[in-house]
Amino acid sequence: MNLKYLHCIFFLMIFGFTTIGYAQKNQPPNIILIITDDQGYGDLGFTRNHYVKTPVIDALARESVRFNNFYVSPVCAPTRSSLMTGRYSLRTGMRDTYNGGAIMASNEVTIAEMLKQANYSTGAFGKWHLGDNYPSRPSDQGFDESVIHLSGGMGQVGDITTYFKGDRSYFDPVLWHNNEQESFEGYCSDIFTDQAINFIDKNKESPFFCYLAFNAPHTPLQVPDSYNQKYKDIDPSDGFGKDGKPFSKMSEKDKEDARKVYAMVNNIDDNLGKLFKKLEDLKLTENTLVIFMTDNGPQQTRYVGGMRGLKGDVFNGGVRVPFYLKYPALYKGNKDVETMSAHLDVLPTLSEICEVEMPKDRIIDGKSLVPLIEGRQVEWEDRSLFFYWSRRYPELYNNMAIQRAGYKLVGKTDYDAAIEDFELFYLKKDPYEQRNLVNENKALAMDLKMEMDNIYNELILSENLVHPPRIMVGTPNENPVILNRNDAGGERGIWNQEEIYGNWDVSVEEGYYDINFKFVEPVKAFGKMVLEANTLVRQMENKKANTDIIHMKRVYFPKMTGLLIPFYAVDNKNIFPFWMEMKKVD
């Protein structure tokens, strides 16, 4: 072999390796967004909980960019809509976790839809909670593959396939795989992780977005017994509160719940170990961006890093959560960012990293965190964040807060309250929200209250809130349609009650429908099954005794938008169905 030929081979080898390296460096990252349900700030070893075992998440935290002042909404569905869209949840039509207020408008653009511009494969696994029917399901909002449960949680009234399983609802469930019911074996967190791993394996050759949303450690607190055994002898209150941080007294019920929660979190940690091992085996770790976060504070009293409040609260215990971002190909890990950040920022951040355009026809409330990751100053460092939580719609000054430049104004009062009825905290010196400064700094408090008023008045007039999203019935995209209790409006607090006024807000295509009404308990014979829909009223006598399903055949509907109001009238009672199935037959 002559020297000239060797030079040629050497040149091709160097050029080839350089090109491969350049291609890898400029390849869009794979994205895995992990969110857990009701796991508080203190439910990690990394945040100094000396009972819960989370070695995988702790290692991820050590290797990540850690956002130490990261905030979400006080409850799950609003957090998820803001996470997916970069917008305050009220802008998206999201106003509750049930009672018909947990449906995100289909005109919202999700992270998945945004990433489609760069030809990402997209998968959602676990909890969705942004709408169970067309046009608000994962498949309608940019996801190619989905394996999910319905409504706010497995074992809850909206998740019709697991509710009646009671204390086994987290085991061997019937889930919704690409909108079709499918039976699975095993424990829910294991199933969701395995499905995510399968998705990653199938899409390893092209960029993917994997949204892994565990429903654990949300109630009901169910976990394989092997995990329960690890925590059965601990005292979850022992040792906390001795470091000067506030710590709430725990009842025996709180302690038992904490043991179960820690077992569920331990299981999640083991599952993430499996997931990250798969990335290593596929040689995808370097170019995969991993985010870990939780959706709100803990539901039950336990260690929460000394912070005040729990899930549902606008105090920090309800809204401050861990947020870790790891992307080895671009960013060095093991870095702390103290600037206030939020769930609103995830979409803009991924937009910048992946070089895909955000929606330009709407307000995006979030900011890209890339400058903070890179150590650069941002002009919005002292921006404001607005928090609220009350059922049905936001109630002025009832569990409402605004945070800006280290100060936080909290309203737990009436709509006409004086400024002295609010609480003002300086979080940089008082992160546990113990010292109320409102009487010492009324001018600042009034300024924050005025800004709170302005944001509130803007958000409650949001188009998707004023004209809320509706479930579409009779389209080829979903037939039959099952209307569940999570999406039922009417009286406040509709759950599994029998005698309660309820309805579903729908848009129905013209045609004939076969309708099934399912009840929580079997109903007596010789009552009247009544269905009202605008000017249409249909009723029929039920002659079957002790039946939990009543059928109506070939009910004609004109094309209509409005409320479906079904009830079974018997013995001077009006019984609301547990769910209602409508199938268009021609």
Image (cartoon, rainbow, N blue to C red):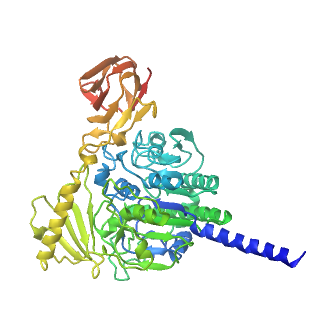
Q: Is residue 400 above or below residue 94?
A: below
Decide which of 444, 523 is in the foreground and name it.
444
Q: In this view, does 216 lie above or below 379?
A: above
Quadrant assignment for the N terminus: bottom right
Q: Which residue lies furthest to the right in this view?
A: 1
Decide which of 122, 361 is in the foreground and name it.
361
- Name the side, left or right, on which 161 lies relative to 272: left
- Name the side, left or right, on which 541 lies relative to 438: right
Q: Can residue 129 be seen in this view?
A: yes
* Residue 524 position in % (x across, y down): 35, 23
Q: Residue at x 53, y 47 (%)?
A: 144
Quadrant assignment for the C terminus: top left
* Residue 560 position in % (x across, y down): 30, 28
Total label count? 0
- Name the side, left or right, on which 325 lies relative to 106: right
Q: Is residue 547 visible?
A: no
Q: Which residue is drawn at 46% across and 34% down?
A: 477
Q: Residue at x 21, y 78 (%)?
A: 435
Q: Which residue lies furthest to the front in this view?
A: 4
Q: Is residue 570 above or below residue 73?
A: above
* Residue 243 position in % (x across, y down): 38, 83
* Residue 180 position in % (x across, y down): 52, 38
Decide which of 113, 195 is in the foreground and name it.
113
